[in-house]
Image (cartoon, rainbow, N blue to C red):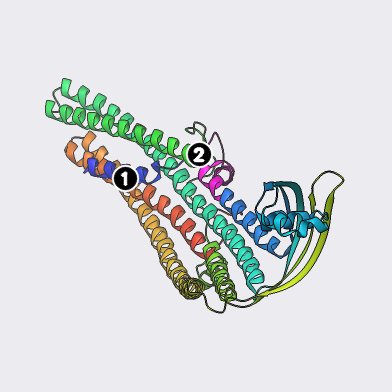
Amino acid sequence: MIIKQVKTIAFLLAAGAGLGAQESFTVAAAIRKAWTDQAGLKAGQAMVESRQAEAEGYRDLRLPTLTLNAHGVRTNEPMMAFGIKLNQARIGMMDFNPLVLNHPDSIGAYGGSAVIQQPLYTGGRITAARRAGDYMAQAEQASQERRKQETAQMVVEAYFGTQVAEQALKWADDTRLWIQGMEDFVGARVKQGLMLESELQRLKAFHAQADAQKAEVIKQVRSARSGLGLLTGSGPVEGPLATPLEPAAMPGLGQGAVQGAAFRGDLVAADLQAKAAKEGAKAARGNVLPEVGLELGAGTLHHSWSEKGNWTWAAVGLKWKVFSAPDLAKAKVARAQERAASDMRTFKQQQAEHEVRVAREAVIAAEARYAAAKEALAAADESKRLREARHREGLAPLIEVLDAEAAIQGARTLILQSLFEIRVSRAGLNLATGNPIEGVNP
């Protein structure tokens, strides 16, 4: 029975073992440290910055583009040779000689041009793309806030999982001290011939079992602290944890918790992604609409530094893809993505409401288990006290005392488990409703 209870504690510790803390700090400090130092969240922030840069690029689509071109050429191709001379402003009467026109000498030229292009109307593509980019950047920021809250919940599990392990270690030491005292008492009685040798051997076996339990708990403590350090972006935590395991009283859980879920980062992100998909569909439809653009340019072509031609131009043009199968297919894809994003937003909202209901019930159940565990521990303590007194008087066998000690260990395990579940379920409720976990805001 004792082994079973210790396995329960070990399972509890394993729940917090993959998480962690830092020297003498509170759970709030651990959460903030994870937000600033954890590599996973740093990668998420890089994604936010990437989306923001992408959004800036979409906004810049409205700006004019400037293209500079420089080139050099040498040719005797008739059309090019005549055109080069014309651009160099050095055409003469001899250049119209049919023989020269048909078989020109090789001619060289160098020059360049500058062209400014400004879109005037693009079927709404640019405006829609800009809005979609802004929405996606905001959605990524909201997703990052959600990732921070999810990390905070994991820190809570790690932090209090570590405390559960350390409290279990203290109780394991208490049990070993009690067994040692019982061994001394029973050993003295055995020497006096008042108790059987088997009683002492049973205690020694119980002692060995307690030593094995302690070794297991020590392993769990070290694993939990190492995991907490991993989660907060540091090495294994060595210092004390300042936030007590037992939580303060929590206000009643009402329907307001469900309403609070509207402020969850993932719900905000889903709504923004749906808006971005809608704008993306508009941009895709704009690909098959006419577009109007303005172009201004200037060019020069040199035969030598002094012999050259210069020209400028200004043009307004209309382009319309009356039919484009690929663009029509892209528009169809964009409409499907818009529907998918809208449906996902609805599902996320429904999922959030479900998570709130489940989280609220988990808090209530954990608090009920904790209350029951305290009563069970008080009863087990009293039972052990009476049985131990009767055993010292020779009125009860040792097995009754050991059973009472096992009952105490079971009650202690239940207390640790219920306290841990209260902390974790409260963090889960805050995560589900979008409220700050342990009162810490991103």
Asked whether 48 falls inside the magenta stretch, the response is no
Q: List the residue tagged with mark 1.
A: 11
Image position, residue 343 (x, y; %): 46, 74
Residue 390 seen: yes
User: Residue placed at 16% from the left, 24% from the top?
Assistant: 190
Q: List the residue tagged with mark 2.
A: 21
Between 190 and 320, which is closer to the camera in this rendering?
320
Image position, residue 253 (x, y; %): 50, 68
Image position, residue 224 (x, y; %): 41, 38
- Residue at the farthest top position: 191
Q: Is residue 302 above or below residue 192?
A: below
Between 405 and 362, which is closer to the camera in this rendering?
362
Q: Amino acid at mark 2?
A: Ala
Image position, residue 95 (x, y; %): 77, 56
Q: Amino acid at mark 1?
A: Phe
Residue 395 seen: no
Q: Is residue 355 above or below residue 171?
A: below
User: Image check: 428 left or right of 409?
Assistant: right
Q: Secondary structure at mark 2?
A: loop
Highlighted range, magenta: 21-44
| Mark 2 Cα-neighbour bin, 10 Å: few <14, some 14–19, many ≥20 | many
Between 320 and 93, which is closer to the camera in this rendering?
93
Q: Secondary structure at mark 1?
A: helix
| Quarter residue 113 falls in | bottom right
Q: CA distance from mark 2 to mark 1?
A: 20 Å
User: Image check: 254 left or right of 66?
Assistant: left
| Mark 1 Cα-neighbour bin, 10 Å: few <14, some 14–19, many ≥20 | some
Asked whether 34 falls inside the magenta stretch, the response is yes
- Residue at the farthest right position: 306
